[in-house]
Image (cartoon, grey):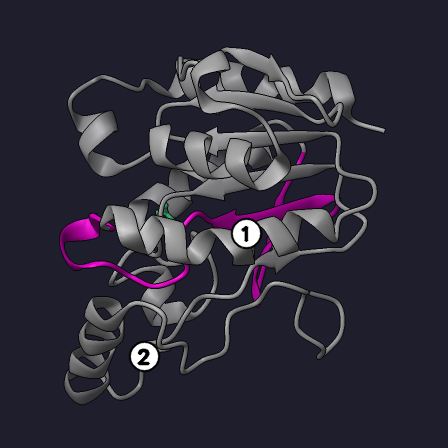
Amino acid sequence: MTDESPHPGTPPKDCALCPRLAAYRAEQIARHPGWWNAPVPPLGDAGAWLAIVGLAPGLKGANRTGKPFHGDEAGAMLFGTLAELGLATETPEGWSAPGLFITNAVACAPPGNLPETAEKHACRPYLAEQLAALPHLKVVVALGETAHQAAIKAIGGKLPKYRFGHGVVHKLPSGVCLVDSYHCSRLNTNTGLLTPAMFKAALESTLAWRP
Ligand code: URA
């Protein structure tokens, strides 16, 4: 964000829509009072052409730093790959990625990195508001199937028409395109489900929409 006002669709810091996630946050506040421990606001500018939707803040990553994909291995892979493609640079304050908007399907860190279905549903209006407030948005990258479903519902489209598949490009009724990628989690990279080359290729495909 370039100013102090929160992006539309930013959940309040004391959001209580998901009792399980609010209780987990309270536990983390007691355990790690110096951490962010609140819904993680999106990162990016209102003029973004590319949005990247992750799953949910990592407990020790975004939930600690307060910035999506900052402070963990998934973030290092995401921003490292964006940097290789000329889409991000590292600054003393964190990653800078002009023209990009980075957010999550679920704004709070879930236990075990696994949001429940009701939590995904509860957080979706925030994502929808965030993406609707990007007038120049051309393409969304969904990191994993939860993000794929959240992005389609948020942007407007019928889920059964669009099957998740790594590298698949979906043209949604609004004209915005959706590129699917396996999530860049440590689990997916350690098991080889997602290789650096596969991830780079999926992100590289978005350059077709770069203004
Ligand atoms: N950090 C995030 O903000 N989101 C993810 O999905 C993973 C790590």
Sequence-first tag of 1 and 2: 2
Residue 22 is a magenta residue: no
**Residue 149: x %, y % from top left:** 43, 32
Q: Which residue is mark 2?
A: 35
Instruction: Give the residue at x 35% y 49%.
Output: 120
**Residue 65: x %, y % from top left:** 40, 69
Relative placement, left or right, of 148 versus 125 is: left
Q: Amino acid at mark 1?
A: Leu
Q: Dot 2 surroundings within 10 Å: few (below 14), some, or many (20 or more)?
A: some
**Which residue is outermost to the right?**
211
- Quick check: 90 above or below 2? above
Magenta residues (range): 87-115
Relative placement, left or right, of 43 versus 192 is: right
In space, the residues marked 1 and 2 are separated at their CA atoms by: 23 Å
Instruction: Give the residue at x 30% y 20%.
Output: 194
**Residue 39: x %, y % from top left:** 41, 69
Image quarter hosting the C terminus: top right
Q: Amino acid at mark 2?
A: Trp
Circle 2: element type: loop
Q: Dot 1 surroundings within 10 Å: few (below 14), some, or many (20 or more)?
A: many
**Residue 81: x %, y % from top left:** 50, 31
Q: Which residue is mark 1?
A: 127
Relative placement, left or right, of 70 versus 187 is: right
Who is closer to the viewer here, 187 or 53?
53
Q: Based on the displayed image, in which of its 4 quarters is residue 27 positioned?
A: bottom left
Image quarter hosting the N terminus: bottom right
Residue 104 is a magenta residue: yes
Q: Does residue 203 appear anywhere in the picture?
A: no
Instruction: Give the residue at x 45% y 66%.
Output: 40
Front tag of 1 and 2: 1
Q: Does residue 121 appear anywhere in the picture?
A: yes
